[in-house]
Image (tube, rainbow, N blue to C red):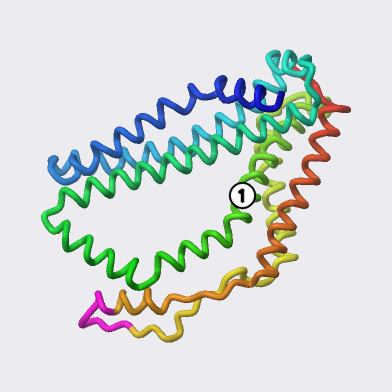
Amino acid sequence: MLIKLIKHDLIATRGEFFGIYLGFLLLSIVAPFLILNGPEWMQVLSVFSVFGVLFAIIIVTLLAVIRLFQKRLYSHEGYLTWTLPVSVKLNLLSKVIVGVIWNVASFLVVWLGALISSTIFLTQLSTFNQVIDTAILLFIRSGFIGKLFNLSLVFLPYSLVTLVYSVVFLLFVITFINTSWIKKGRNAIGIVLYFGLSLVIDAITTRFITQMPININTENFIFNPTDPLLSAYQALSQFNYTINGGVVLAMIALQVSFVVLMTIGILYFVEKKMEIE
């Protein structure tokens, strides 16, 4: 049943994403040619268009997830959703999973567009081979990419937990403003509550997490202005870091704690205080 719920929610919301995803990818293909070969005004317009669509993807993802929660849980359509022979927990879980899926999809589309643009842009340059050789020297032979990849693997669990936390946090706020306690000004109260709780949670996190999870070592780096390429290679080769595993685990534990507390709150609101429009 969970798979069916996720499938229907994805189908119901896909129309909000596919258009802007396709537009961004097409722009990622066209923009490099316009930047390199077009008139100056076209170059400027292309750059602003790419960043504009990128920003739009972020906004569309946020608004689509908000509409997913509001429309399919706390509107007339939501009333029908709650009449399905599905438990409250399963219904809410499907919405959280779909919210996470669309956030991951937007992230992947942005990186795919950046990869397409950079590849086309580089292949159009007359100094393509030189640029590739320099990139290989700086990022691969220096070992920088490998270190960065290992670092990303270490923080992958925290990133996933943070993503789930952000979606559950949004669901918590939307559920609260749809309770019988809130009669008027739900949108305004939701915005104030979202940012207010964010500040409180940040303060709590800062209170408990007093150390940096990662320390970057740059003590041995000396910049040589006469040979910036060699300096960059040495800097990337000497790039090193130490990870405070205890701090990383504490950050994950704190995020999980917030998710658990907000989940308990959501279940209480839905079962005791929910008010569907």
**Near-viewer residue (5 or 201):** 5
**Near-viewer residue (57 or 252):** 252
Q: Residues within 10 Å of mark 1 (few under 14, many from 20)?
A: some
Q: Where is residue 237, by image quadrant?
A: bottom left
Inspect the image, locate mark 1, and give the three-letter code of the amino acid beneath it.
Answer: Leu
Residue 244 drawn at (x, y percent) = 64, 72
Residue 135 drawn at (x, y percent) = 27, 64
**Near-viewer residue (6 or 218):** 6
When the figure is inspected, residue 58 is found, relative to residue 270, above or below; the finding is below
Q: Secondary structure at mark 1?
A: helix
* Relative side of 63 to 90, left or right: left
Residue 204 drawn at (x, y percent) = 74, 59
Quadrant in the picture for the C terminus: top right
Magenta residues (range): 223-230
**Near-viewer residue (5 or 54):** 5
When the figure is inspected, residue 100 is found, relative to residue 220, above or below; the finding is above
* Residue at (70% x, 35% y) in the render: 171
- The residue that label 1 is drawn on is 160
* Relative side of 38 to 15, left or right: left
When the figure is inspected, residue 43 is found, relative to residue 159, above or below; the finding is above
* Residue at (69% x, 42% y) in the render: 169
* Relative side of 129 to 277, left or right: left
* Residue at (45% x, 85% y) in the render: 219
Q: Is residue 258 covered in magenta?
A: no
